[in-house]
Image (cartoon, rainbow, N blue to C red):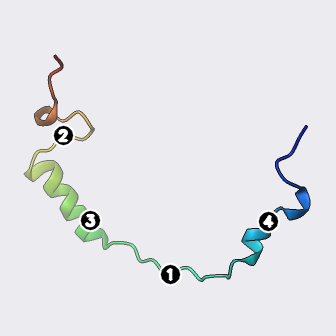
Amino acid sequence: MATHGSLTKAGKVRGQTPKVEGRKRTGTNASVRNKSNFKKRFALSRVPGQNKPGQRRRRR
């Protein structure tokens, strides 16, 4: 089986790149998320999914 490039060079670029620390991610506040979900589902009475009733196009 032929290989694309020699195996001695495997991981060359990843080894050369400097290590960058990831940023600290904070989650959203649960009460804010629940409030927006309530508004979307019940107050605006939206239907989940891609085929929403108002956005469907008729095919010719």
Residue 37 image point, x, y percent: 22, 57
Q: Secondary structure at mark 4?
A: loop
Instruction: Provide the residue designation for mark 1.
Output: 23
Whole-Å distance between the Cαs marked 2 and 3?
Answer: 18 Å
Q: For the residues carrying marks 1 and 3, which lies nearer the camera in this image?
A: 1
Q: Are marks 4 and 1 in contact (CB under 8 Å)?
A: no
Whole-Å distance between the Cαs marked 4 and 1?
Answer: 25 Å
Above or below, comparing residue 28 to residue 44 in the picture: below
- Mark earlier in primary sequence (1, 2): 1
- Mark earlier in primary sequence (4, 2): 4
Mark 2: give few (<14), some (14-19) or many (20+) Cα within 10 Å. Answer: few
Indicate which disc residue 33 carries. Answer: 3
Q: Are marks 1 and 3 in contact (CB under 8 Å)?
A: no
Q: For the residues carrying marks 4 and 3, which lies nearer the camera in this image?
A: 4
Q: Are marks 4 and 2 in contact (CB under 8 Å)?
A: no
Which amino acid type is shown beneath numbered disc 4?
Answer: Gly
Which amino acid type is shown beneath numbered disc 1?
Answer: Arg
Quadrant assignment for the N terminus: top right
Mark 4: give few (<14), some (14-19) or many (20+) Cα within 10 Å. Answer: few
Instruction: Provide the residue designation for mark 4.
Output: 11
Residue 32 image point, x, y percent: 23, 70
Q: Residue at x 61, y 82 (%)?
A: 20
Residue 49 picture quarter: top left
Instruction: Provide the residue designation for mark 2.
Output: 47
Q: For the residues carrying marks 4 and 2, which lies nearer the camera in this image?
A: 4
Q: Residue at x 9, y 50 (%)?
A: 44
Whole-Å distance between the Cαs marked 4 and 2?
Answer: 48 Å
